[in-house]
Image: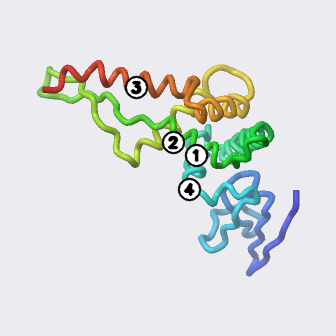
């Protein structure tokens, strides 16, 4: 790991510290403090260029450990790159296509009519929430059970890329439930 030093007015930034913990921090008088906006250094792996992938890393993150989440996603993308060499598709594109394939279009929501009566109705998910919901499917799948989470994430991404697997089952389950509740809509 390469250490690059940036010194300006008693402020020292270590890119290795940034890379490990995911959020830029600065060292002021021997203490790590929140970063200044103009001092942010991009990560070496280039995952921060796409806001969708950055959002995916934030959703995969557990207990505020963004560095670990970034490492899990990076390892999964490296596995995809090793396996997808013949097809020539970049791993970043495989991930984004898998997220697109897993997007649900409808959900079931409970609507209160008055104090006691409620009604279960299907609702169309807005475009902005569809991608987030598909990312949450990946989080739910990788957080189940034990084992290496980057391998589970790799399997989920590849299977969703091919329109199959547990992620697509979650999506289909959500759609079937919404269709079943469609009879309540007049």
Point out the frontmost of discs 3 and 1: 1
Residue denoted by label 4: 51
Say whether marks 1 and 4 touch (CB < 8 Å).
no
Label pair 4/3, CB-CB below 8 angstroms:
no
Kind of element beneath mark 2: helix
| Sequence-wise first label, 3 or 2 | 2
What residue is disc 2 on? 100
Numbered circle sitting on residue 10: none
Q: Whole-Å distance between the Cαs marked 4 and 2?
A: 14 Å
Q: Quadrant of residue 185?
A: top left
- Whichever of callouts 4 and 3 sits on the residue coming sooner in the sequence is 4
Q: Is residue 84 left or right of residue 65?
A: right
Which of the two discs, 3 and 2, sits closer to the camera?
2
Residue closest to the eye, 165 or 2: 165
| Residue holding disc 3 | 174
Looking at the rendered structure, the secondary structure element under dot 1 is helix
Examine the image and state in which quarter residue 65 appears: top right
- What percent of the width, then of the height, locates residue 106? 34, 33
Q: Which residue is mark 1?
A: 96
Q: Residues within 10 Å of mark 4 (few under 14, many from 20)?
A: few
Q: Tell me where residue 95 appears, x and y as whole percent.
A: 62, 43
Alpha carbon separation for disc pair 4 and 3? 26 Å
């Amino acid at each position: 790991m390469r250490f690059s030093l940036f010194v300006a007015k008693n402020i020292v930034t270590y890119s290795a510290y940034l890379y490990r913990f995911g959020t830029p921090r600065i060292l002021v008088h021997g203490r790590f403090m929140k970063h200044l906006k103009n001092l942010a250094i991009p990560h070496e792996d280039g995952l921060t260029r796409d806001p969708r992938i950055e959002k995916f890393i934030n959703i995969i993150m557990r207990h505020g450990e963004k560095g670990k989440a970034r490492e899990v996603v990076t390892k999964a993308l490296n596995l995809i790159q090793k396996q997808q060499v013949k097809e020539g598709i970049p791993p970043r594109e495989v991930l984004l296509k898998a997220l697109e394939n897993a997007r649900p279009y409808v959900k079931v929501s409970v609507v209160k009519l008055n104090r006691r009566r409620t009604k279960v109705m299907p609702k169309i998910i807005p475009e902005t929430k569809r991608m987030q919901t598909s990312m949450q499917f990946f989080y739910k799948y990788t957080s189940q059970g034990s084992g290496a989470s980057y391998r589970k994430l790799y399997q989920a991404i590849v299977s969703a890329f091919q329109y199959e697997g547990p992620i697509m089952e979650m999506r289909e389950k959500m759609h079937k439930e919404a269709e079943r509740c469609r009879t309540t809509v007049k």
